[in-house]
């Protein structure tokens, strides 16, 4: 980890970005500069974390020679100009999830980074949650036998969120986690509802049956329009995860996981969980990215690989609107899929950088 200190992090966006900073602080990572257009918030956060370099213009942060990695914690529809400017400046990029709510934009950003030979990682922080990392040594045939089913269930009431669409805003966590564990999706069948608006305006409930190419099937259920007490602690970041195999099962949430095994005898294991989703998953993401930059390895949630996650999000929404099973092979990377609630800024729109 000491070698990663040579990389200076430049963080853009101090909303959820403050969780990034807490995670980086715990991991001892070096934040070279921060940026936010709200000068009051910028200075408050800078004072709290002892960060001297503070910018209200994105272009100034990117130009800072002490910044090696641009950490983007801004909304999807304004990311393209930032990615282009950062890549042209030779900066590596960590981008918040969802990577994009437009297929064309997602592909463009990946291509830009590859053209300029900079690394692009998507902040699929669910893949780096301490509780979920703790169970990964048991997600295999040796412990569980043939794994055939997984479910992730999340409840709550939060209908007014910036992205408007629950599938890319929240279920992307679960889609990305299943992708990490079991590989690419083959098909999805999704039902959705908007509570007090249409699905086209933005779903707030989504339930999807899926099948992966590896044969694992499952259920991803997310309900952000539940008016009553959920009765169980299933609110994010405590959604319930279940993984079933022929010899065992894993169940629980990010703070409390149980591994139930039946061979050679029945026993239960409580894996040691070191940390919490907020903020430790964010620190783990960046630590992994910096280690990859140091060793030359590809990040677990690299930009090119994350295009499949973006495809899956669009497949789910298409299934919800059509009422049909959608095959992932029928969602092309050059398709005109767009769920953004606001116009997507082109990569050449430099006004975002000012």
Image (tube, rainbow, N blue to C red):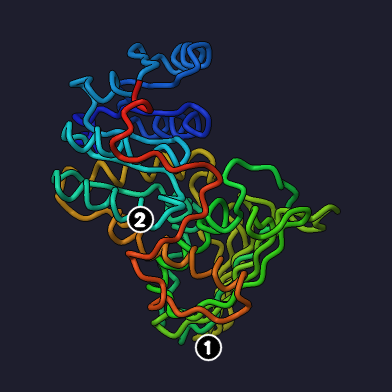
Q: Is residue 1 above or below residue 60?
A: below
The residue wearing badge 1 is 246
Label 1: few (<14), some (14–19) or many (≥20) C-alpha neighbours in 10 Å: some
- In which image quadrant can residue 87 be found? top left
From the image, state whether disc 1 or disc 2 is nearer to you: 2
Q: CA distance from mark 1 to mark 2?
A: 41 Å
Residue at left 45%, top 48%?
97
Q: Is residue 152 above or below residue 229?
A: below
Image location (x, y in percent) of residue 226: 79, 55
Q: Nearer the viewer, residue 244 or 213?
A: 213
Image location (x, y in percent) of residue 217: 52, 81
Residue 38, labelled with which disc? Answer: none
Which SS class for mark 2? helix
| Label 1 vs 2, first from the N-terminus | 2
The N terminus: image quadrant: top left
Q: Nearer the viewer, residue 95 or 194?
A: 194
Which SS class for mark 1? loop
- In which image quadrant can residue 300 be found? bottom left
Label 2: few (<14), some (14–19) or many (≥20) C-alpha neighbours in 10 Å: some
Q: Is residue 229 left or right of residue 4?
A: right
Q: Is residue 176 left or right of residue 1?
A: right
Residue at left 31%, top 61%?
305
Residue 104, labelled with which disc? Answer: 2
Q: Is residue 236 left or right of residue 271?
A: right
Q: Nearer the viewer, residue 43 or 329?
A: 329
Residue at left 45%, top 35%?
74
Image location (x, y in percent) of residue 260: 58, 75
């Amino acid at each position: 980890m000491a070698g990663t200190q040579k990389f200076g992090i430049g963080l853009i966006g101090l909303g959820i970005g403050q969780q990034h900073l807490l995670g980086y602080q715990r991991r001892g990572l070096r934040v070279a500069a921060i940026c936010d257009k709200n000068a009051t918030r910028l200075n408050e956060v800078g004072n709290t974390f002892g960060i001297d370099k503070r910018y209200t213009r994105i272009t100034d942060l990117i130009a800072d020679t002490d910044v090696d990695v641009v950490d983007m914690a801004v909304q999807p529809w304004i990311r393209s100009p930032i990615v282009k400017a950062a890549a042209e400046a030779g900066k590596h990029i960590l981008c918040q999830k969802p990577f994009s709510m437009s297929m064309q934009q997602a592909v463009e950003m990946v291509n830009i980074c590859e053209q300029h030979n900079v690394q692009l990682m998507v902040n699929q922080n669910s893949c780096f949650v301490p509780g979920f990392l703790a169970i990964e040594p048991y997600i295999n045939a040796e412990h569980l036998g043939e794994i055939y089913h997984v479910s992730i269930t999340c409840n709550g009431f939060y209908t007014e969120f910036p992205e408007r669409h629950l599938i890319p805003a929240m279920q992307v966590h679960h889609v990305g986690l299943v992708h990490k564990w079991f590989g690419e999706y083959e098909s999805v069948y999704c039902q959705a509802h908007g509570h007090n608006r249409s699905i086209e305006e933005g779903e707030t409930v989504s339930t999807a049956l899926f099948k992966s190419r590896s044969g694992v099937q499952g259920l991803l259920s997310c309900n952000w329009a539940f008016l009553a007490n959920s009765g169980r602690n299933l609110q994010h970041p405590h959604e319930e995860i279940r993984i079933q195999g022929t010899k065992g099962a894993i169940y629980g949430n990010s703070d409390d996981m149980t591994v139930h095994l039946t061979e050679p005898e029945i026993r239960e294991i409580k894996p040691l969980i070191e940390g919490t989703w907020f903020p430790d998953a964010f620190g783990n993401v960046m630590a992994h990215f910096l280690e990859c930059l140091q060793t030359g390895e590809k990040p677990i949630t690299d930009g090119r690989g994350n295009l499949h996650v973006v495809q899956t999000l669009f497949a789910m929404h298409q299934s919800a609107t059509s009422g049909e099973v959608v095959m992932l092979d029928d969602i092309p990377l050059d398709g005109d899929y767009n769920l953004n609630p606001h116009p997507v800024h082109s990569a050449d729109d430099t006004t975002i950088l000012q």
